[in-house]
Each structure stands twice: as C-alpha cells, then as structure tokens.
Image (spheres, coloured by chain):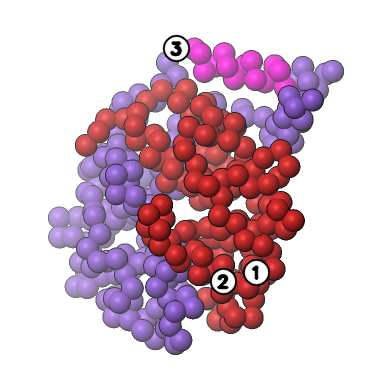
Chain colours: A red, B purple
Amino acid sequence: MDVRILQEAIHHLDPHLADHVNIELPLAEAVAQMQEVTSEHQRGMGALLVTQEDKLIGIITERDLVRRVISQKRDIKRLTAGQVMTAQPETLTAEDPIVFALNLMHFGHYRHIPLVDEENKPVGIITSKDIIKYISQFIKSI
Amino acid sequence: MPFESFVDDEISTMQEQLNESGRALETHEIQVPLGSIMHHVPSVLSGASVQDVINLMVSHDIGSIFVVSDESLKGVIGERDILLKVLNKLGDYANLSVDHFMKCDPLTLKPEDLLDTAIQHMAQGGFRHIPIVDDQHRPLGMVSVRHIISYLIEHFPQEVLTLPPKPIRNAMRAREGA
C-alpha cells in the first residue's frame, strides 16, 4: 500500500450527501431521521449535520445521544437538535487530501467529518468506515 | 509574503517526501497480527440490563461492549443498536435485557489473524468493530476502525505530522480562491 493513495482528494471516497436539520428542529424528529433505514443507510445514520441559515453549525452523533440524552435520562421530547449537538465541528472540503481526514479522526477521536463548501454550507460527510473501504482496495484481498 | 512562502515550502517539502522512494507501507506492516493492535473492551453477562450497558459505555468512554455467557462471546452491543432500537421507541428500556438489542454471533477473528484481513472484512461487511476471540470463543479484545486509522497514522508519521495546521490551510484556501 502506497502512502500516496492518502494524498488523493476526499471526493475519491465517494462521500455521502449531507443529511442536515435545522438547529431548532425538535430532537425527536432529528432522531427519527437518523433511525430511518434506507438503501444507502442500512443501519440508519450515525451522525446528522445541524445548520442555521443553511450554514453548518453543529453535528449530532450517536455518541452525543448516548452521552447527553440517554445516559442522563433526559426527555427527548423537550429538546431541540441545537441543545444536543456538538457545536462548530472540524470540517474539511471535498478537495482536501484524505490524509487530513485521517489526521482529524486520529487526533480528534472523530468518526464523522462534515464536508463544507466555501460558504460553510454542508455538502457531504465522511466516516472512518469510508476510509477503511477506500484503503481496502489497495491491499491484499481475502 | 513570508507567510505564503512558508506555506509553499511546507507543501513542496511534503511533496518531496512523498515522491521519495520507499514511502509505501510495506506488506509486513499491513500484516501485523490483530492481537498486537486490539484493545480491551468490557463485557456484560447475557441478561444484563440496557442501563448496565449504557453505564459501561459512558464510564469506559467506549462505543461497544461484549455480551458473554459462560465466558463465551454471545454478541456485541454498540451505540448504533441503542440509537436504532431503544431511543424514543421504548418507554422504560433501562431494565430490559441487553440480549434483545445486541448483535448476535458477530463475525470474529483470532489474535494471529492479520490486519489486512480485518480491513477487508470491515470493508465488505460494513463492520466498524471485529471481536477477537480465542479457541474457546472467549473475547480477548476488539479491533475497531478507529484503532486501524490510528495504527496507519502512527506508521505515516512524516506525512501526517508535518501537515500544515488548520489556520494555515484556511489561509491557503483563501489565497487559492483569490
């Protein structure tokens, strides 16, 4: 496996489109969206982007939900997306090299990285699984 | 400008390093045994409550837990299972048995199996975690996508650690867009 494959742009990972919700959306509706099983998301979604005036302002991950809602026994019906999200997440663009994403995932312990355009509008999301899938093409098959 | 020339120097140094021969991750580095990179994951007994699992996830800052019976691995329960099957779907889930929500009989590998095997299984099966078990099917540890990424980063220190920090990258982007 040649390290140069990690210098390719993130769009080579074929990122998922960015599913996003408004910061004011009731959390129950955001969670329902994450739980939805589709052909693209066969086990739901582990993260949802949060926007305000179409700009990325936060991310809600399954980890946030377990730690900030479930374990604290908070009532999901009384919360909004904005009250549970991780604010101002680290972002990349689809033109950044893949190694930037590895770097953020390793040092920031993130599993999801939002992709934004030059106006900070969400355009996609990549996960650590996308990276493993990409790398798997370049190593011995089983 | 001195700032821009610094960025240009950094980028060109990075490119030179990458273009040198020998920057490949050698086959033996990908073929490291999983026993050497797996990490400890706590277990609960089959029949334990969902609340026990949630408490363990939070106290150990971990995303998935082994479920065992007679020391043998029966299943794995992760944050996604809690999100999909529990949150906002069941009124009083805290005392329900984890067995209803866990993934039963997950794919497992042995500590002597190799990293490239784990990567291929994860890519093909869409798994984020693979339990590592012994010959009696007792769980020894977990190999996760996150730990594989960390392993790769640690074996590419030059390329990763010399990346320009984010403010410089943003400045680069602004300049490129100008």
Residue assigned mark 2:
A29
Q: Nearer the viewer, mark 2 or mark 3?
A: 2
Assign the C terminus of chain A to one quadrant of the image. Answer: top left
**Badge 1 and badge 2 both on one subunit:** yes
The amino acid sitting under disc 3 is Ser
The amino acid sitting under disc 2 is Glu
Does the CB distance between marks 1 and 2 fall below 8 Å? yes
Q: Position of residue A69 (x, y in %)?
A: 57, 74
x 60%, y 57%: residue: A20
Can residue B161 be spotted in the picture? no
In the image, taking residue B107 as reference, residue B149 lies left or right, namely: right
Residue assigned mark 1:
A25
x 53%, y 47%: residue: A17
Assign the N terminus of chain A to one quadrant of the image. Answer: top left
Residue assigned mark 3:
B21
Q: Nearer the viewer, residue B7 or B55?
A: B7
What whole-number distance in Å separates the C-alpha atoms at marks 1 and 3? 52 Å
* Segment colored magenta: B7-20
The amino acid sitting under disc 1 is Leu
**What SS does tag 3 mark?**
loop
